Image: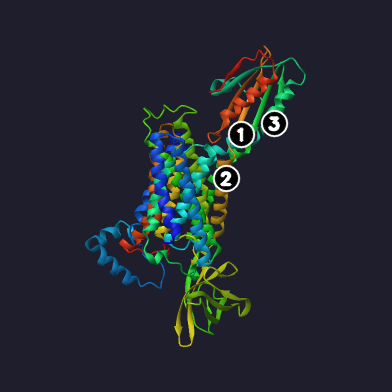
């Protein structure tokens, strides 16, 4: 039993390390691209009851002939609800979740809990380094702080024995941008699941001056009070307006106009204008009644994605490290997010400014 | 086709030829002729779009012709911003080549598309502007990225690792990554605005409509590119190849999906 448990833990650990890899994410995204593109090439079985299913099937049979059965067996006519696509989305969601859990702590630490002190490996691993001779003045470190602050860096200083550490950071909170985008993607998938499981939509035929209850919500009913077509001077339709009264348990709860792009909403149910047919002097109208609890999360997810991208792409994190040496010089190193395109020039400029304020025996720069 | 749109198309070709000449001669006059032609194209196209909007009483975003003109305008605008900020016109012939693909599609639309008509009831929404403008800005940025990527692919670098910081290859790669980073949030906004509009119009924010599906394919492709950048062996020419292919996906979404819908006789709620 202990062996099974350790094997399971080992498998889960390997699975975890597999799912956090970027190349795995790339493969999953590419797989989803291929599936979506494939599904778009075949007609999908309509879900609307207004479309005759038998006629649709006959049209597909006429188009694909002997291949129809084979394509049907592959699930290509209902591809976007197929196990293959659902599995691909689930895997991508799982990889995103694992990656988010794996990275949130270091990203949070980078944003809020970085220590001022750092090890020498910073200088070994930074491509941008410089050394500046420090004059023996009391306000030398203040000048260094001022120079970095003038370039928009938040500067923290810590002195330990005879060594002083300086950390200047800009946009340190921007590392949370990628966290926001990944959380946004997870929320998007959650919203889609809520829509798939808990939404309903029902088409209604509403005749003039008739009382029409909603099938999923028998307590709600619509009364058609008039349908109007507004026209342009050339006679073409400019707008369609349906005046309705909405009753909840026989009491009026809403009265208004439903237009294309302007549904009537009440208690989480939306009423949408779908079509009309002239019946004598008046119009019989078809409405769609919809309740979808997934819509709100999906829109919030979109906002999170946008906000996270804006932060990640436009506020790149950059950091300048400084440490005094016993010889009286200041060693500098610079690191930045790859989107900080002008950072190498900025680092050179800062080092040159500090050099100009220091003694003429400054050692020099190592900034490619 | 209105005169200003025809002149735009003509001057874009003049700009392309001037850029090619400038690439060989590297003279000040040839460079100024090329950039001046692009500026003139941009001004004429802006005038054309404004005239069309004033005549129609709505933004020129309601059919394939108008959308293609706006797409071309977006590519030219982003290219001119790049040229002014970098003071460099070496990407000109490539980006103009990309812009001319879209512009040629615009000028070959049938007369019925080019005619100005009143706004259909289904298009009377602020989300038309938000959705279409965002998407076309994204497509424009991807078009510029594709031009830069094409330029990168034509460079005879011996290996993908031989990119010198501050060298020509590094500048091109930075610019093409920045263009993708510009376009991707705009595409996200365009798809989000489309989802909101679809919910308001049709009662569902996503329906796997062919146009919606291919917009998602485009978004996923560039999402893949943003992740691939972190992989060491996928810089340089490989990344440039992916970006050029990504613009191919953009063109299929913009031009190919209506053809797919007609050919396979698919159901689609999108007019174009």
Q: Please give left or right for residue A143 compared with residue A181 in the image.
A: right
Relative to B59, residue B216 above or below: above
Looking at the image, the residue that sits furthest to the front is: B29
- Label 3 or label 1, whichever lies nearer to me, is 3
For the residue carrying disc 1, how many other residues have a C-alpha within 10 Å: few (<14), some (14-19), or many (20+)? some
Task: Measuring from the top left, give residue A47's x and y in whole percent.
Answer: 41, 67
Residue, disc 1: A110
Q: Please give the chain letter of the residue carrying mark 3.
A: A
Disc with the residue nearer the chain's start (2 vs 1): 1
Alpha carbon distance from label 3 to label 2: 24 Å
Q: Quadrant of the N terminus of chain A?
A: top left
Task: Measuring from the top left, give residue A217's x and y in whole percent.
Answer: 54, 73
Q: Nearer the viewer, residue A222 or A132?
A: A132
How are the residues colored? rainbow
Residue, disc 2: A310
Looking at the image, the residue that sits furthest to the left is: A66
Kindly state the secondary structure of the residue where label 2 is placed: helix
Looking at the image, the residue that sits furthest to the right is: A138
Mark 2 vs 1: CB contact within 8 A: no
């Amino acid at each position: 039993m202990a062996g099974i448990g350790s094997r399971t833990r080992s498998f889960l650990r390997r699975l975890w390390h597999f799912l956090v890899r970027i190349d795995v994410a790339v493969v999953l995204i590419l797989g989803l691209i291929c599936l979506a593109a494939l599904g778009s090439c075949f007609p999908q079985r309509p879900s609307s009851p207004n479309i005759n299913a038998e006629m649709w099937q006959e049209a597909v049979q006429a188009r694909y002939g002997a291949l129809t059965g084979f394509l049907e067996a592959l699930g290509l006519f209902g591809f976007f609800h197929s196990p293959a696509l659902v599995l691909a989305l689930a895997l991508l969601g799982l990889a995103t979740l694992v990656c988010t859990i794996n990275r949130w702590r270091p990203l949070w630490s980078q944003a809020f809990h970085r220590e001022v002190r750092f090890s020498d490996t910073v200088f070994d691993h930074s491509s941008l380094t410089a050394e500046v001779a420090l004059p023996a003045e009391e306000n030398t470190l203040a000048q260094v702080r001022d120079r970095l602050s003038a370039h928009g860096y938040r500067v923290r200083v810590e002195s330990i024995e005879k060594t002083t550490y300086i950390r200047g950071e800009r946009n340190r909170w921007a590392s949370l941008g990628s966290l926001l985008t990944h959380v946004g993607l997870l929320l998007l998938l959650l919203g889609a699941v809520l829509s798939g499981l808990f939404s309903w939509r029902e088409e209604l035929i509403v005749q003039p001056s008739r009382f029409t209850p909603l099938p999923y919500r028998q307590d709600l009913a619509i009364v058609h009070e008039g349908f109007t077509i507004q026209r342009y001077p050339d006679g073409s339709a400019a707008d369609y307006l349906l005046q309705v009264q909405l009753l909840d348990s026989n009491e009026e709860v809403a009265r208004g106009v439903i237009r294309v792009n302007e549904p009537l909403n009440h208690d989480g149910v939306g009423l949408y204008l779908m079509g009309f047919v002239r019946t004598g002097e008046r119009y019989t109208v078809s409405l769609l009644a919809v309740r979808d609890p997934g819509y709100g999360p999906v829109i919030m997810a979109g906002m999170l994605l946008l906000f996270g991208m804006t932060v990640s792409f436009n506020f790149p994190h950059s950091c300048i490290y400084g440490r005094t040496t016993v010889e009286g010089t200041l060693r500098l190193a610079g690191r930045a997010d790859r989107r900080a395109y002008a950072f190498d020039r900025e680092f050179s400029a800062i080092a040159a400014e500090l050099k100009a304020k220091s003694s003429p025996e400054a050692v020099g720069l190592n900034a490619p | 086709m209105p005169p200003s749109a025809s002149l735009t198309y003509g001057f874009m070709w003049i700009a392309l030829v001037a850029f090619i000449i400038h690439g060989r001669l590297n003279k000040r006059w040839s460079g100024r002729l090329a950039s001046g032609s692009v500026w003139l194209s941009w001004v004429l196209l802006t005038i054309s779009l404004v005239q069309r909007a004033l005549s129609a009483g709505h933004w020129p975003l309601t059919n394939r012709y108008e959308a293609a003109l706006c797409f071309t305008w977006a590519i030219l605008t982003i290219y001119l911003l790049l040229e002014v900020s970098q003071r460099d016109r070496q990407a000109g012939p490539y980006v103009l080549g990309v812009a001319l693909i879209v512009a040629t599609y615009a000028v070959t639309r049938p007369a019925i598309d080019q005619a100005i008509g009143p706004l259909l009831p289904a298009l009377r929404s602020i989300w038309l502007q938000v959705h279409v403008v965002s998407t076309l800005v994204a497509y424009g940025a991807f078009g510029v990225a594709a031009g830069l990527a094409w330029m990168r692919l034509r460079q005879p670098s011996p290996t993908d690792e031989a990119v010198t910081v501050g060298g020509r290859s590094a500048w091109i790669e930075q610019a093409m990554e920045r263009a993708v980073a510009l376009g991707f949030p705009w595409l996200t906004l365009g798809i989000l605005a489309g989802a909101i509009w679809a919910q308001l119009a049709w009662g569902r924010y996503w329906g796997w409509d062919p146009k919606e599906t291919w917009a998602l394919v485009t978004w996923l492709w560039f999402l893949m590119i943003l992740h691939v950048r972190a992989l060491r062996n996928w810089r340089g020419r490989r990344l440039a190849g992916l970006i050029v292919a990504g613009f191919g996906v953009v063109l299929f979404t913009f031009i190919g999906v209506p053809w797919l819908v007609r050919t396979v006789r698919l159901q689609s709620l999108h007019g174009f």
